[in-house]
């Protein structure tokens, strides 16, 4: 069925939270998703810690994976003790409860201390959803905790695709800030060669902001999250194929290169070019292996 996620922005000092039901990760991680609109709007106003939190944190002893106070406070924005009990009615009798009880207590105690704000209507108006169907990809998404930054225009140019005639993209915020496992469903069939799937989950709970100018002491990182299927269709539609019917990536005629991932999402398995074959009902894409993925040579 898949894990349900919540998009959470929270200010620890002011004790303010803004939380949105983001459903299953691969349903609402896009540039046109309401939860993404709200997160982008908030980050253009001031810094917030961001957590794309999965409900699986309440299962068994999963909360043990979180040790930082900032992360436990993030979890407290969208779950409380009732969520733990909902999965295990007699959780206090479970063998593992002794080692997680302090964290569960901390999360529960903080759950009701937050002041709630909802900015969805303001966000939709700010980005003019009816006209643009997308947040703005301008400026820089910066991580104050790690002093890193993503050029949003560059990210969008490498990650965008077309869905139901809307130009969109998997947004970087859900992938960078998720608590775990969601990106695997979004990238289940593989990613483009330029994707940086290794960055998923690495900004979870960090203090983020969207600004117009890159701070001088922040490091700009390469960031791209583009799933294989959507990007292949986009490149075929926009750039077409070369003389051998292989889908090309850009106006220069470079072939699109995609990769498959292992079942644990830890390693790339193989590289492919994509050949387009016209059939009666449309286009059939064939993946032609280039070579076995060589971690040492990459």
Image (cartoon, rainbow, N blue to C red):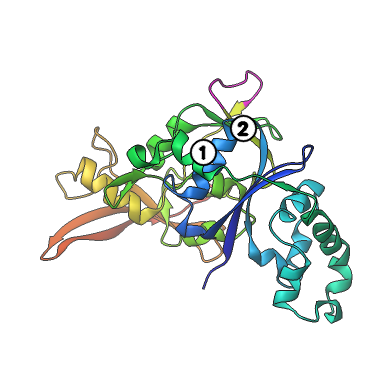
Q: Residue furthest top?
A: 216
Q: Is residue 135 toward the left or the right of residue 112 in the image?
A: left
Mark 2 residue crowding within 10 angstroms, few (<14) / some (14–19) / many (20+): many
What residue is rendered at 26% in x and 48% in y? 165
What residue is rendered at 81% in x and 48% in y? 69
Mark 1 residue crowding within 10 angstroms, few (<14) / some (14–19) / many (20+): some
Which stretch is magenta?
211-218
Q: CA distance from mark 1 to mark 2?
A: 18 Å
Q: Residue 209, located in which quarter of the rendered image?
A: top right
Q: In the image shown, does 178 or 79 lie closer to the viewer?
A: 79
Residue 38 sits above or below residue 52 on the image: above
Residue bearing mark 2: 209
Which one is earlier in the sequence, the residue at label 1 or at label 2?
1
Q: In the image shown, does 287 or 21 lie closer to the viewer?
A: 21
Residue bearing mark 1: 122
What residue is rendered at 41% in x and 37% in y? 156
Q: Residue 106, located in which quarter of the rendered image?
A: bottom right
């Amino acid at each position: 069925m898949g894990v349900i996620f919540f998009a959470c922005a929270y200010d620890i000092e002011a004790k303010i939270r803004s939380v949105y039901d983001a459903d299953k990760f691969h349903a609402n991680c896009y540039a046109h998703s309401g939860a993404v609109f709200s997160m982008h709007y908030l980050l253009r106003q001031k810094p917030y810690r961001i957590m794309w939190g999965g409900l699986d944190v309440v299962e068994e002893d999963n909360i043990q994976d979180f040790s930082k106070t900032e992360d436990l406070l993030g979890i407290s924005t969208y779950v409380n003790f009732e969520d733990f009990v909902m999965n295990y009615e007699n959780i206090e009798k479970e063998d593992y409860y002794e080692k997680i009880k302090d964290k569960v207590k901390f999360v529960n105690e903080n759950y009701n201390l937050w002041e709630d704000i909802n900015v969805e209507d303001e966000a939709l108006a700010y980005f003019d959803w009816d006209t643009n169907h997308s947040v703005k990809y301008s400026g820089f998404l910066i991580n104050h905790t790690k002093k890193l930054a993503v050029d949003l225009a560059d990210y969008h140019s490498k990650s965008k695709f077309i869905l139901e005639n809307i130009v969109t993209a998997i947004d970087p915020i859900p992938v960078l800030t998720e608590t775990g496992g969601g990106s695997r469903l979004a990238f289940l069939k593989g990613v483009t060669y330029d994707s940086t799937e290794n960055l998923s989950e690495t900004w979870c709970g960090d203090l983020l902001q969207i600004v117009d100018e890159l701070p001088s002491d922040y490091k700009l990182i390469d960031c791209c999250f583009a799933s294989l299927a959507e990007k292949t269709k986009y490149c075929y539609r926009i750039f077409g194929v070369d003389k051998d019917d292989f889908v090309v990536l850009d106006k220069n005629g470079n072939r699109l290169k995609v990769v498959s991932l292992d079942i644990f999402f830890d390693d790339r398995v193989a590289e492919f070019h994509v050949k387009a074959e016209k059939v009666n009902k449309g286009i059939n894409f064939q993946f032609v292996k280039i070579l076995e993925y060589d971690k040492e040579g990459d």
